[in-house]
């Protein structure tokens, strides 16, 4: 249920509405807009019908949310969520590019990459320290040492950083080193991890599971939002289909479909979506044209020698060239790099 307060509703009226919602056994989630304040009543308390709040002081309208995802829906919040971080505004008219290697391998590699992607126009440095791999014999990441190198590279270049967190136990450590917590496709429905991400109040990049529907993705985001953490972005990274030529099938129509249903920023990952460096540029351009709020692109100084995902990683030169090509597309859809 969404309670829309009148324009000019007083702090006392808003506070009384919150108290009444909580007394009914619901959580009150408050969004303060430019003109109005809205309060989402979410939970499993007693039946809450619109007429209950009709007579409350300062209430203009009560709307029932029919979708299973409440806080993530456009019914709860019409305006796009904008996540402001160190000068970047994810979800606004700014196209925010996150770029870097699949895995942090050593100091030289991450520093060289960080400098190059910054010069090309990226705002966020990506790099894995803990890597979930299909084979137990594959490189699993540098762990805490990798986090420290990623943090150092971010500090030296002024870039924000994003890296994956794989367990509840890792959450405090990763949150100390990274600006954005990534929850990977394999962990999209790791509910204890989603709860912990919500409680952290840290920005979260939530990737779509390999076989997840869009509703399942938004329901996973709902877990994080339910803890009052509003800084959530969802990521389309390709889904598993019968096609074997590409690593995954990038679901381009997921971008406008998610934006139609949800106010959360949508990030596109053309690297995992294709699995082939030669295809990354075309899919990245398509994602921008479709309205993505940002891109997540794997970049490596020497992809042939990368310890993980070299086949889908762009060289530093190819990334710089792509960034130049993306500018015109961004302008055409009302965005800027």
Image (cartoon, grey):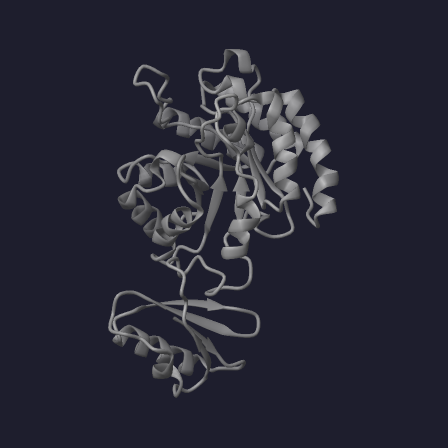
**Percent of width and height locating residue 153:** 51, 29
**Percent of width and height locating residue 319:** 64, 26
Q: Is residue 223 left or right of residue 253?
A: left
In this rendering, the answer to whether 312 lies above or below 206 is above
Image quarter in which the N terminus is found: bottom left
**Percent of width and height locating residue 148:** 41, 29
Q: Is residue 61 left or right of residue 326?
A: left
In this rendering, the answer to whether 135 lies above or below 326 is above
Query: Which residue occupies 72% across, 40% down?
Result: 329
Residue at far front of view: 242
| Number of marks drawn | 0
In this rendering, the answer to whether 36 lies above or below 258 is below
Query: Which residue occupies 39% across, 88% down?
Result: 55
Q: Is residue 147 left or right of residue 321?
A: left
Query: Which residue occupies 47% across, 79% down?
Result: 61
- Front residue of 192/114: it is 192
Residue 306 appears anywhere in the view: yes
Query: Which residue occupies 52% across, 74% down?
Result: 36
Image quarter in which the C terminus is found: top right
Q: Is residue 74 left or right of residue 143?
A: right
Residue 108 appears anywhere in the view: no
**Percent of width and height locating residue 111:** 54, 23
């Amino acid at each position: 249920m969404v309670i829309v307060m009148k324009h000019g509703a007083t702090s006392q009226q808003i506070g009384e509405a919150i108290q009444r919602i909580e007394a009914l056994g619901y959580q009150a989630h408050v969004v303060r807009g430019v003109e109005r304040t809205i309060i989402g009543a979410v939970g499993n308390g007693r039946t809450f019908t619109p007429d209950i709040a009709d007579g409350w002081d300062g209430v203009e309208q009560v709307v029932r949310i029919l979708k299973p995802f409440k806080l993530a829906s456009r019914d709860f919040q019409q305006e796009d969520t904008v996540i402001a971080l160190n000068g970047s505004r994810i979800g606004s008219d700014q196209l925010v590019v996150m770029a870097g290697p699949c895995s942090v391998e050593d100091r030289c590699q991450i520093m060289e990459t960080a400098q190059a992607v910054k010069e090309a126009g990226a705002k966020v440095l990506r790099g894995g320290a803990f890597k979930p791999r299909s084979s137990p014999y594959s490189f699993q990441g540098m762990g805490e040492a990798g986090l420290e190198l990623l943090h150092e590279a971010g500090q030296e270049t002024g870039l924000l950083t994003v890296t994956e967190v794989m367990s509840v136990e890792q959450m405090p450590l990763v949150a100390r080193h990274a600006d954005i917590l990534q929850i990977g496709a394999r962990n999209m429905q790791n509910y204890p991890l989603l709860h912990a991400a919500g409680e952290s109040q840290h920005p979260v990049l939530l990737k779509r599971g390999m076989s997840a529907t869009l509703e399942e993705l938004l329901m996973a985001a709902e877990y994080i939002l339910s803890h009052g953490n509003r800084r959530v972005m969802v990521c389309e990274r390709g889904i598993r289909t019968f096609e074997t030529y590409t690593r995954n099938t990038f679901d381009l129509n997921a971008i406008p479909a998610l934006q139609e249903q949800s106010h959360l920023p949508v990030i596109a990952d053309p690297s995992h979506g294709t699995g082939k460096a030669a295809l990354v540029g075309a899919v990245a351009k398509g994602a921008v044209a479709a309205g993505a709020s940002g891109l997540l692109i794997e970049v490596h100084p020497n992809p042939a020698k990368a310890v993980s995902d070299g086949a889908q990683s762009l060289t530093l030169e190819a990334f710089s060239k792509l960034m130049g090509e993306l500018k015109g597309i961004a302008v055409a859809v009302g965005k800027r790099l």
